[in-house]
Image (cartoon, rainbow, N blue to C red):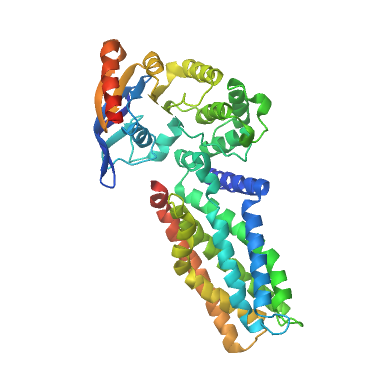
Amino acid sequence: MNEIEAKNICRSFGRRDVLKDVSFTLEKGGFLSIFGPNGAGKTTLVKILSTLLSPSSGEVHIAGIKLDDDPTDIRKQIGLISHQPLLYLDLSAYENLIFYGTLYGVDDLEERAEKLLEQVELTHRRHDLVRTFSKGMQQRLTIARSLIHGPSILFLDEPHSGLDPHAMDILDGLIESIRADHTFVMVTHNLRKGLDLGSAAMIIEDGRIIFHKGKQDIDETEFEEVYRVAVRGEVQ
Amino acid sequence: MKPFKQFWVILKKDIIMEMRTKEMLVSMLLFVMLTMIIFNYAFRADRNDLTPFGGGLLWLAFIYTAFLGMNRSFVHEKDQGCLEGLLLSPVDRSIIYVSKMAGNLIFLSAVEFAAVPIFTMFFISFPYYMHPDKLGIFLLGLVLSNIGIAAVGTFVATLAVNTNRQDLLLPILGLPLLMPVVAPAVIISGTIMSGSTSKHEMELVYESLKILAAYDIIFFVVIAMIYDFILGE
């Protein structure tokens, strides 16, 4: 069963076409790694899939729900880790988790918040303001925030950027621990990580999918060549 | 129950953060006090009876104080992309609006209730003209005006949050939209502070209260209904 289904998505900002006729599917439990040069439309695609943007045309189904029909129901099932931590600097780590958990109507919220803080190794700093956290600690708390409501689909937009090796290990460990019963879409520039984690890989260039294959069909040399040509296009 | 919980948690978060940073309250209080001090010297309040102009001076200070505060009401949401976090959650957009508006209303009212007694000392000649039995009408006028200002101010602040000219947009869009609030507010405050009890003037006050109530209901309902489109993208 397809957990994510995108049909002919186009998205423009003014006269600029950022996404052009993007179609793909991702089965339940799948892990799609999306690569591409800066400005290719990767983040726009993630924003559309996570209900933050509407497509100019085309159809999106998430967990069997059409995006236009019930975005609120979709939001209950998705989590997002993006470039920005989406954390309130003047609330403590614990208060941030309780705040987001209450918005999602999470049961046993306090217990869940404590458990997540433990998993991201922030229990000792749970009552400190996020303002006092390092970038790596904020990113670890972001991981906890995105998991507070137990989403079944996770969108990761360059989740490893700015992380120290320890935070990277925690993120990878968490992904690994929930991998079996979650669906992932990850935007990354890290070829090795993307290919290792993903069950499928996609390259977007100038708003179009130029490469999309399942892991078993990927010839890494061919993939790297396509990727390098796409990124070089950005430089020119 | 869940929508109320969501409303309360967003409002509580805004109050907690404001109590910790005091960014809005301090800047609003300083501004309103400074305005009053300048008015005091400019109009030689020690020599002239400014009571007839009290309503106008009061609302001139309050309206810009409100803009100053509301410009900052989305700063925390913009920082670190928190607005995206709110939009990602399964919360009806109208609840986000009502919570943010309630926060603005509370902060604006707190500043006004601190400023009104000081204003009275500066500008209303002793013995004060205001009849104690008219205090309720004065406060009702203040509250209804604040609801209108918070309703429209929150709406415009949301529009402004994604623009580069955030500080400009609020007065440019907000002032024309708030004229129907400012005029009755000045009439109510001015009349009550001047101690007038003439039938004609009190009728004008009651009409102004009705205008404010109608404005509040219409703008609150319409903005809550369209807020999804405003926040949309």
Vertical arrangement, residue A85 with respect to residue A180, above or below: below
Q: Which residue is drawn at 31% across and 32% down?
A: A40
Q: In the rendered image, which quarter is residue B62 located in? A: bottom right
- Residue B210 seen in render: no
Q: In which quarter of the image is the C terminus of chain A?
A: top left
Residue nearest the viewer, comparing B204 with B38: B38
Residue B192 location, quadrant: bottom right
Question: Residue at horizontal 59%, vertical 72%?
Answer: B59
A183 to the left or right of A102 = left
Instruction: State whether residue A169 appears in this view.
Output: yes
Whole-percent x and y of residue B121?
Answer: 74, 74
Counting from the top left corner in percent of width and height, residue A81 is at 46, 30
The spot of residue A167 in percent (x, y) is 54, 21
Residue in the foreground of this view, choosing between A80 and A66: A80
Q: Is residue B28 left or right of residue A139?
A: right
Q: Quadrant of the N terminus of chain A?
A: top left
Left or right: B77 as drawn, with respect to A26: right
Q: Where is residue A10 in the image (x, y as percent from the top left)?
A: 25, 38
Picture layout, residue B27 above or below residue B76: below
Residue plotted at (53% across, 76% down) = B184
Residue lying at the far front of the rendered structure:
A236
Asked whether B172 or A153 is in front, the reply is B172
Q: Nearer the viewer, residue A37 or B207?
A: A37
Marks counted in the figure total 0
